[in-house]
Amino acid sequence: MNIHFVLLALLADGPRSGLWLREELAAGHSGIHPLNTRQVYPALIRLERAGLVESGGAAGADDRQQDFQITAGGQRELAGWLRATPAPGALPGDELVLKIQLAGQVPGTDVHEVIQAHRRYLIELMQRRTRARQDGAGQNLGRTLASYAEMFWLDSVIRWLDAAEGLLGPGLVGRATSRPPADQIWASDADRERAVASLRDHFAEGRLTHAELDERLTTALSAQTAGDLRRLMTDLP
C-alpha cells in the first residue's frame, strides 16, 4: 500500500493532525486496510519536504499535534496518481483497488471518470492480447494456456470495476457526479470490439453455431449501450 497517497487523499478533505491521521489509519475507518502506524510520521515528513503537504511548524517537530494540509502540488500529484494506468503491457495490481477506494473519498474527484480511465486501459490490453493469441494460434500450447488465464483475469478485473462503479454511484453525495445505471452507459467502439472478439472465441470453442455468430456479431456492432452488449453474453460463460 502506498501510504503517501493514502495520506494525501485523507488530507484532501481538509487539514488533519498527525495524531488524527495515525488513529484513522489504525482503525481503518476510511475503508483502507489498517496499516503500520509507525509509517505515518516519517511519510508526512517526506511529503512536507517534497512540497506536497505543509504544516504550521518545522518538519518533524511534534508531528502528533501539528495540523497538516495538502498543497496545490499535492492535489495535482494525487489526481495524476489516481488516473495513472500501469506501464504499457503491464498488468494492474492491488494498487488499483486502493486507487478506486481513495477516488471515492477525495472531494471534487469524479470516481466514475477514474474508473473509466482504468477500464479503457484494461479493454485495450485485452484486445492486444487477443490479437497476439490469434496471430500465434497453434504455435505453443503453454503460451496459449497462459494467454487464456490472463484474459480471464483481465475480464474479472473489468467486472470488478463495473461492480465498483455501481456501488460508488449517485449515493456519494458531493464526491461524484450523477451517472446513469451501468447498463445504460453508451458503449464505445472498444467495448464493441471486445464483445466481437469474445463472441469469436466462443464460436471457436463450439458454443455458437455459424448462424448464431453472424447474428450476434451484427447485434454487437450496432450495440448502443453496455446493456446491449451484456445481453449478448448472458447464456455464455
Image (cartoon, rainbow, N blue to C red):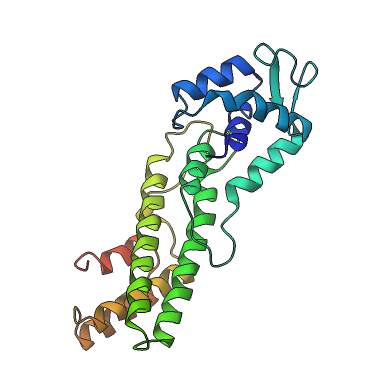
Task: Please tell me which residue is depicted at 79% across the width and 16% down the height of the picture.
Answer: 57
Tell me the quarter of the picture where residue 197 sits. bottom left
Q: Is residue 160 left or right of residue 89?
A: left
Residue that protrudes farthest toward the right in the picture: 58
- Residue 227 in percent (x, y) is at 33, 60
Task: Please tell me which residue is depicted at 57% across the width and 56% down the height of the picture.
Answer: 85
Q: Is residue 188 visible?
A: no
Q: Across the whole image, how many numbered discs are drawn on residues?
A: 0
Residue 223 vs 177, above or below: the answer is below
Q: In front here: 1 or 231?
A: 1
Tell me the quarter of the picture where residue 59 sits. top right
Residue 183 vs 192, above or below: the answer is above
Q: Is residue 75 left or right of residue 151?
A: right
Q: In front here: 199 or 127?
A: 127
Task: Please tell me which residue is depicted at 42% across the width and 56% down the height of the picture.
Answer: 185
Q: Is residue 26 visible?
A: yes
- Residue 20 in percent (x, y) is at 57, 16
- Residue 198 in percent (x, y) is at 33, 74
Of the 4 image quadrants, the one containing the C terminus is: bottom left
Task: Please tell me which residue is depicted at 54% across the width and 56% down the height of the picture.
Answer: 117
